[in-house]
Image (cartoon, rainbow, N blue to C red):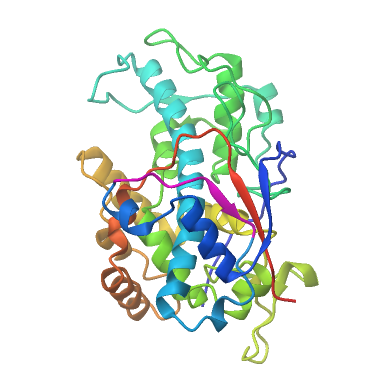
């Protein structure tokens, strides 16, 4: 599989949340039941998704007799993570949209956008967000919390006032907002030393449909049972050419002369962050971003199956891969989860699992 992926960006340590002891697959099922994390009720919209964050997948997942139980644990594990990363992206997107609209002189409740908005960044701001700033996200602690209003979201360097995006109509960006936009642009693969097209940046700062992320993770990792998923939290088939042993896992059937390995991640949340960053930045997925932006402009929901058609470059299998993922989505009714929402509880439950050795 060919998976061009961006490097990772170090993140400041985050505050701890409630941590559960290390659990195996059966105990995880019991925990999900205890927290009323019932997929049937999530599918129908009767219940929100609890903020349960698993650091990894249990080592005995592949040994479970019930295929349905294995799939349940996988979806129960991945669904909160996908929603959490989308929540981080949505937070940045909302602020960026407000800044874009304020520059165009559009009222906050207006639905129609004006012409292109761009911002020039001065030398001091550019120095704060260098052109070679890495993109992606590195989780340094599995125990995390959801930032409250006024707290910097993932990847930000400092706390941001909750009202920072509220600017007079037609106003230029404040120095604080210029720094924030420059850093966001660098994270999303744009050159912050040049004029930043905010509309172009918004085409990158956007969510990935939940069913697409779930299906690709299931397809690439064998529903979390592959060696790469168990030993490296690698769920999306992303490759690395790093010479450092800790960076990847060598496939057993690697072709002679091929130096690629499957990239390893500190935990599952980091893996999901880098997967979405990959789709939102790499040239191979420009059509994905363009189609998503068109749906946004038309006021339509993000159509997973339509967007999936643009990912023929995600795998060397091309259309065969797209067909397999589409079939997986349909046969498992994964689009039911596209409208799932996170519970509004402030604290996350971080679960350590008994990992493969």
Q: Is residue 241 left or right of residue 90?
A: right
Q: State the image coordinates of residue 62 (x, y, percent, origin top left).
A: 55, 81
Number of labels in the image equals 0
Q: Is residue 48 magenta?
A: yes
* Residue shown at 32% from the left, 58% from the top: 40
In this view of the protein, which residue sits in the foreground, 227 or 73? 73
On the question of residue 314 being in view, the answer is no
Q: State the image coordinates of residue 288 (x, y, percent, origin top left).
A: 35, 56
Q: Is residue 61 left or right of residue 115?
A: right
Q: State the image coordinates of residue 161 (x, y, percent, origin top left).
A: 58, 17
The quadrant the C terminus occupies is: bottom right
Q: Is residue 133 left or right of residue 314?
A: right
On the question of residue 198 being in view, the answer is yes
Part of the protein shown in magenta: 46-55
Q: Is residue 254 magenta?
A: no
* Residue shown at 45% from the left, 34% from the top: 344
């Amino acid at each position: 599989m060919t998976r061009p992926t961006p490097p990772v960006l170090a993140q400041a340590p985050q505050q701890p949340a409630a941590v559960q002891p290390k659990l195996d697959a059966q105990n995880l099922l019991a925990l999900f039941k205890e927290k009323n994390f019932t997929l049937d009720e999530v599918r129908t919209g009767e219940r929100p998704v609890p903020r349960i964050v698993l650091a990894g997948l249990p080592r005995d997942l592949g040994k479970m007799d019930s295929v349905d139980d294995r799939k349940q644990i996988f979806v129960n594990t991945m669904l909160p993570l996908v929603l959490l990363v989308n929540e981080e992206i949505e937070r940045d997107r909302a602020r960026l949209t407000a800044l874009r609209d304020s520059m165009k002189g559009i009222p906050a409740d207006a639905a129609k956008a004006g012409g292109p908005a761009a911002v020039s960044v001065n030398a001091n701001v550019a120095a704060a967000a260098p052109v070679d700033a890495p993109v992606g996200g590195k989780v340094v602690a599995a125990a995390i919390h959801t930032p409250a209003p006024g707290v910097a979201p993932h990847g930000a360097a400092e706390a941001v006032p909750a009202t920072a995006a509220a600017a007079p109509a037609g106003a230029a960006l404040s120095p604080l907002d210029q720094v924030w936009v420059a850093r966001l642009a660098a994270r999303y693969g744009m050159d912050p030393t040049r004029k930043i097209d905010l509309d172009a940046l918004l085409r990158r700062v956007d969510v990935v449909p939940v069913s697409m992320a779930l299906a690709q993770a299931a397809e690439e990792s064998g529903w979390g049972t592959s060696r790469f998923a168990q030993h490296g939290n690698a769920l999306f088939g992303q490759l690395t050419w790093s010479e450092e042993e800790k960076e990847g896992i060598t496939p057993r059937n690697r072709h002679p002369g091929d130096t690629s390995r499957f990239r390893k991640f500190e935990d599952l949340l980091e893996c999901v962050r880098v997967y979405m960053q990959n789709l939102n930045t790499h040239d191979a997925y420009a059509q994905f971003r363009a189609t998503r932006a068109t749906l946004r402009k038309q006021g339509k929901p993000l159509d997973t199956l339509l967007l999936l058609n643009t990912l023929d470059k995600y795998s060397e299998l091309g259309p065969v891969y797209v067909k397999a993922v589409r079939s997986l989505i349909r046969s498992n009714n994964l689009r039911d989860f596209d409208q799932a929402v996170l519970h509004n509880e402030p604290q996350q439950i971080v679960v350590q699992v008994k990992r493969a050795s």
